[in-house]
Image: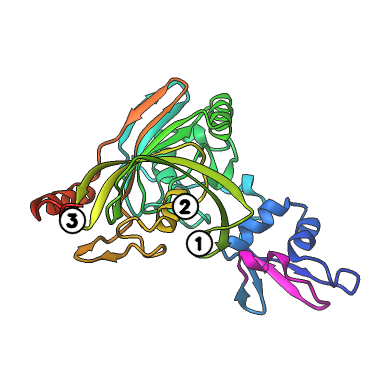
Amino acid sequence: MEPTVVEVGPAQAGERLDRFLAARLAVSRARVRHLLEVGRVVLAGRPLGLPDKSRITAAGDAFRILGTLRADEERPEARPDLPLRIVAEGRGWLVVDKPPGVGVHPLHPDQRDTVLNAVVARHPEIIGIGEGGLRSGVVHRLDVDTTGALVFAFDEEVWRRLRGAFSDHRVDKRYLALVAGRFAKSRPVELTLAVGRHQPAHVEVVASGRRCRQHVTPIRAFSGATLVEVKLETGFLHQIRASMAHLGHPVVGDREYGGASEGAITAPRPMLHARRLVVDEISADVALPADFEALLASLEAAGPPPAA
């Protein structure tokens, strides 16, 4: 597909880029931000990023937009060869056990290795549900390296109902996390978070932002780390990872938030797992993945933690 080229004339100079492109392409500003986020807006041979959304246009700028402009014109490719472990399913929905290192949905049409690509092969009717396009049927998301319960809907009415439950915080979501240090007491954690950086995303604790709540309960103490259960009361990008790091207990293996190595404890990814999800008629529990279990076994074998 040939790229779409949009040039800035003298009358459009001085506009915000996202507003300018939305008007010229007849798409939403949210769509423009997505195109920027996945590197599909190019200026002078350089892909722009999400921070460029507020860039001020100049006369003579020629933006090349790669691929389709409208989200509903994009279709995730069916991949029946990809593994897909379904842990619960019902009328119009299914819960899968998301493996580590796999994205929830494609960020661009050429990406073919996400969970949604595997789901489309089993339920082609999911195409066009919800946000449609490359996000068809996606009810919520998990980070690429987070494992566990992930819900898709392949019926529009079911998608709207479940999405509403997530928006209204009517979902019981519980995670297991291995965090650095001794987390001694069960406690609520309420912090104000905001995205401080895009590509790669980084969330910070700020004075003004989204108020986020969770309850953290220690389950098992090891030498140098604690296995905790986190019950989310709100949902925000990197909420658990950013919050635990702010408390001085980053998730083990989390290079972005400072938990890549704590003493002798190392892990190739953040040790974070969505173990339980309950919403409306859905109730799903997902066992820990093999790498998480193996790390806990090695910590167990190393002996008990020193006395507090």
Residue 182 numbered tag: none
Residue under numbered circle 1: 202
Residue 59 location (% of width, % of height): 83, 77
The CA distance from mark 1 to mark 3 is 28 Å
Query: Residue at 50% across / 30% down in the picture?
Result: 154
Highlighted magenta segment, given as a residue range: 48-66
Contact (CB < 8 A) between labels 1 and 3? no
Determine if residue 78 is in view. Answer: no
| Residue type, mark 3 in image | Ser
**104 relative to 132 in the view: left or right:** left
| Residue type, mark 2 in image | His
Residue under numbered circle 2: 238
| Residue type, mark 1 in image | His
- The front one of 254 and 158 is 254
Residue under numbered circle 3: 223
The CA distance from mark 1 to mark 2 is 8 Å
Determine if residue 128 is in view. Answer: yes
Contact (CB < 8 A) between labels 1 and 2? yes
Residue 251 location (% of width, % of height): 34, 55
